Image: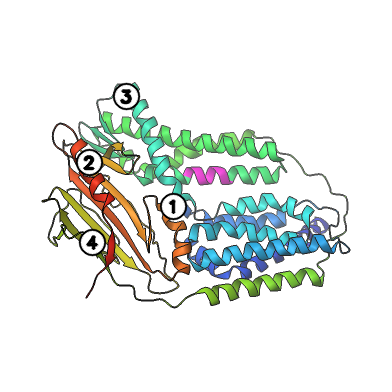
């Protein structure tokens, strides 16, 4: 047993060293990632345990040993691997510079693999890949899946509830019962079940040394199982709420109910999955990390750090934006048809256009330092408990929202202004940070247009918003 443990530690020490080097190379992003883990939010509560599991697997089940892949005489191959490391570190540095956090986080496992290839070679990198995939599950990318999961859950649960003959008014993600209302909100997305289910599947795949086919089957099965559990949970809660007149304790303790249901599904399945015992590996020559390979690591560190230092331009004080259309009048006390909520740092202004038929809203902020994002994180400014999306027009630019439990409908359009760039897609807005940052542009705004529909249709309101948006531009306010 002691001999086996010492051999496992010997096999793992290279990968532990590589992990430490990668964390030093991308220290700002790793530091921010650890801070995200310790917040213990729903979508990333598994982050720190996943990282600890990643480290623990090196001792109890290290990557399989491979033949030496040093290729000391193959200078060309070493140069290619080293240049690959320099490239991915520079890409990470640019993403870190403009604070596109999601992409910067996604670069961490890429840098980890690039360091492995540079120091150990191709074969050790291949056997290390499953562990890196498991580590990738700790990245804060899960929150981006929540809106899609909520929509899918709403559609499935609505169909299932209707099939049970329950008397309910279903409006988007709102389910109104005779004695109350249930909302399929972010907490009902099932993101926690999905993350833990995939993590369990990845751990089982590593312990059983599955190949690509086995990994694919396990991950697909884990995703389907997690989605099914969440749909069953929500449907069960709706039925319990309906037949108990909203008085059951399970409705209030739905989180505990969900995890008990998750355990009831997952534990029996994990117990019947066959376990494969790893055979003793044929002794292989351990990798030799030569000096010329470490030169690329040092160069990557200097290039990444130097790039961030040199390209952080001095922040300029861009003047606040205002409307260029003289027919629009500012209305500080105006009450928008659909109330909007923005983070505290935003300066929110409202204008009326065409005699109160169109309301124009500009919520803007400025990047004050290199530590801030040009395009900050934004939640949906519309309260889902009050409004839900009824239909889409004009290529998804103009949407129609209906008030929950009401007949009022309002046409709504929204886009983002990033310096001189404009887009209606938030993901594209994050990408447009790159050219805007290099041009020294520091102001960002969310522009919205609203117009109330009449009782018959929303065609007139949609046309007003479309015509107004075509001629609407922002300009610096002259003080």
Q: Mark 4, mark 3: which one is toward the viewer?
A: 4
Q: For mark 1, does the 10 Å Cα neighbourhood hold few (<14), some (14 to 19), or many (20 or more) residues?
A: few
In magenta segment, residue 359: no
Residue with the mark numbered 3: 162
Q: Mark 1, mark 4: which one is toward the viewer?
A: 4
In magenta segment, residue 196: yes
Q: Mark 2, mark 1: which one is toward the viewer?
A: 2
Q: x and y percent of residue 68 in the render?
A: 86, 57
**Quarter of the image where one finds residue 279:** top right
2 or 4: tag closer to the N-terminus:
4
2 or 1: tag closer to the N-terminus:
1
Mark 2 to mark 3 CA distance (whole Å): 36 Å
- Magenta extent: 193-199
Residue with the mark numbered 4: 323
Mark 1 to mark 4 CA distance (whole Å): 25 Å
Q: For mark 4, does the 10 Å Cα neighbourhood hold few (<14), some (14 to 19), or many (20 or more) residues?
A: some
Instruction: Tell me the residue at 24%/70% (across/down).
Output: 477
Mark 2 to mark 1 CA distance (whole Å): 26 Å
Instruction: Return the residue nearer the eye: 23 or 359.
Output: 359
Q: For mark 3, does the 10 Å Cα neighbourhood hold few (<14), some (14 to 19), or many (20 or more) residues?
A: few
Instruction: Tell me the residue at 30%/67% (across/down).
Output: 345
């Amino acid at each position: 047993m002691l001999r086996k443990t010492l051999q496992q530690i010997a096999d793992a020490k290279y990968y532990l060293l590589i992990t430490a080097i990668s964390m030093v190379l991308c220290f700002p992003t790793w530091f921010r990632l650890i801070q995200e883990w310790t917040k213990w939010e729903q979508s990333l509560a598994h982050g720190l345990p996943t990282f600890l599991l990643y480290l623990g697997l090196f001792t109890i089940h290290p990557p399989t040993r491979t033949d030496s892949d040093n290729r000391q005489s193959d200078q060309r191959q070493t140069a290619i691997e080293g240049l690959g490391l320099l490239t991915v570190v520079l890409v990470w540095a640019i993403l870190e510079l403009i604070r596109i956090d999601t992409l910067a986080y996604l670069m961490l496992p890429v840098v980890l693999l690039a360091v492995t290839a540079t120091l150990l070679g191709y074969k050790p990198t291949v056997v290390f890949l499953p562990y890196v995939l498991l580590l990738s599950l700790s990245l804060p990318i899960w929150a981006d899946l929540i809106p899609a999961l909520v929509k899918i859950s709403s559609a499935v649960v609505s169909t299932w509830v209707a099939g049970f003959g329950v008397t309910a008014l279903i409006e988007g993600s709102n389910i109104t019962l005779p004695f109350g209302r249930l909302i399929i909100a972010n907490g009902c997305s099932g993101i926690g079940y999905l993350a833990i289910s995939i993590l369990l599947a990845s751990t089982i795949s590593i312990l059983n040394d599955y190949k690509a086919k086995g990994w694919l089957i396990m991950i697909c099965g884990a995703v389907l199982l997690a989605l099914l559990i969440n749909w069953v949970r929500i449907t069960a809660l709706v039925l319990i709420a309906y037949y108990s007149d909203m008085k059951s304790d399970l409705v209030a303790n739905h989180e505990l109910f969900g995890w008990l249901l998750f355990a009831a599904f997952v534990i029996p399945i994990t117990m019947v999955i066959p376990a494969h015992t790893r055979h003793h590996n044929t002794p292989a020559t351990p990798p030799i990390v030569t000096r010329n390979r470490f030169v690329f690591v040092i160069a990557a560190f200097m290039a990444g750090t130097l790039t961030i230092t040199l390209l952080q331009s001095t922040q300029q004080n861009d003047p606040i934006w205002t409307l260029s259309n003289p027919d629009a009048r500012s209305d500080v006390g105006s009450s928008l048809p659909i109330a909007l909520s923005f983070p505290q740092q935003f300066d929110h202004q409202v204008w009326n256009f065409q005699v109160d038929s169109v309301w124009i809203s500009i919520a803007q902020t400025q990047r004050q330092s290199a530590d801030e994002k040009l395009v900050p994180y934004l939640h949906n400014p519309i309260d889902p408990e009050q409004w839900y999306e009824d239909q889409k027009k004009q290529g998804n630019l103009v949407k129609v929202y209906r008030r929950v439990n009401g007949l009022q409908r309002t046409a709504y359009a929204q886009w983002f202004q990033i310096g001189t760039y404009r887009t209606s897609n938030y993901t594209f807005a994050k990408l447009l940070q790159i050219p805007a940052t290099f041009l020294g542009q520091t102001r960002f705004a969310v522009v919205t247009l609203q117009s109330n529909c009449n009782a018959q249709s929303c065609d007139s309101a949609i046309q007003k918003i479309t015509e107004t948006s075509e001629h609407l531009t922002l300009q610096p306010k002259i003080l």
